[in-house]
Image (cartoon, rainbow, N blue to C red):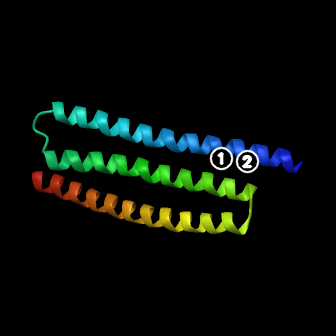
Amino acid sequence: MEFFVTRVLGLLATIVDASTGAAIGVGVLAALVRTAKLGLRRGTSLDSAMSEIRITLGRWLALALELALAADILRTVMIPTWDEIGKLGAIVVLRTVLNYFLEREIGEEQKKAEYVLESAA
C-alpha cells in the first residue's frame, strides 16, 4: 500500500510541476500577445500598456509559485525526513516572501493603471 501511495503522490507532484511550467508559459505568451496588441493599437499610452502587461504576467507568476510550492509539499510528504522538512521550510519561506512582494507589486501596478485611466478621462 505504501508503494502505491508513494507512486501516486510522485505522479501527482510531477503533474503539478508540469502545471507550474505551463502557467509560466501561458503567462509569458499572454504578456507577449498583449504587448503585440497594444503595440499595434494607436492612442494607447505606453505607461498604461506596460502596467497591464506587468499585472498579467505577475498574476501568472504568482500562480506558478503556488503550484511549485504544492509540488514541493507533495514530494516532502513522500519522504518526511528532517532534512527534507527543513528544506521544505526554507522553500516555503522563500516562496512566500517572493509571492508577497509580487502581490504587492501587482497591487501597485493596478493602482497606477487606475490612476492613468482616471487622469486620461
CA neighbours of label 2 inside 10 A, class few (<14), some (14 to 19), many (20+): some
- Label 2, on which residue? 9
Picture quadrant where residue 39 is located:
top left
Element on which disc 1 rests: helix
Q: Residue at x 47, y 42 (%)?
A: 23
Q: Where is residue 6 in the image (x, y as percent from the top left)?
A: 78, 48
Q: Which of 4 and 44 is in front in this view?
A: 4
Q: Residue at x 14, y 40 (%)?
A: 44
101 left or right, relative to 92: left
Q: Where is residue 24 in the image (x, y as percent from the top left)?
A: 44, 43
Asked whether the residues under the numbered discs 1 and 2 touch, taking CB atoms below 8 Å apart as contact, a structural biologist would say: yes
Q: Can residue 109 be seen in this view?
A: yes
Residue at the outermost right position: 1
Residue at the outermost top position: 40
The tag on residue 43 is none
Picture quadrant where residue 70 is located:
bottom right
- Label 1, on which residue? 13
Mark-to-mark CA distance, 1 and 2? 6 Å
77 left or right, relative to 87: right
Element on which disc 2 rests: helix
Q: Residue at x 48, y 51 (%)?
A: 63
Q: Can residue 121 be seen in this view?
A: no
Q: Position of residue 92 (x, y in %)?
A: 55, 65
CA neighbours of label 1 inside 10 A, class few (<14), some (14 to 19), many (20+): many
Q: Position of residue 99 (x, y in %)?
A: 44, 61
Amino acid under disc 2: Leu
115 left or right, relative to 34: left
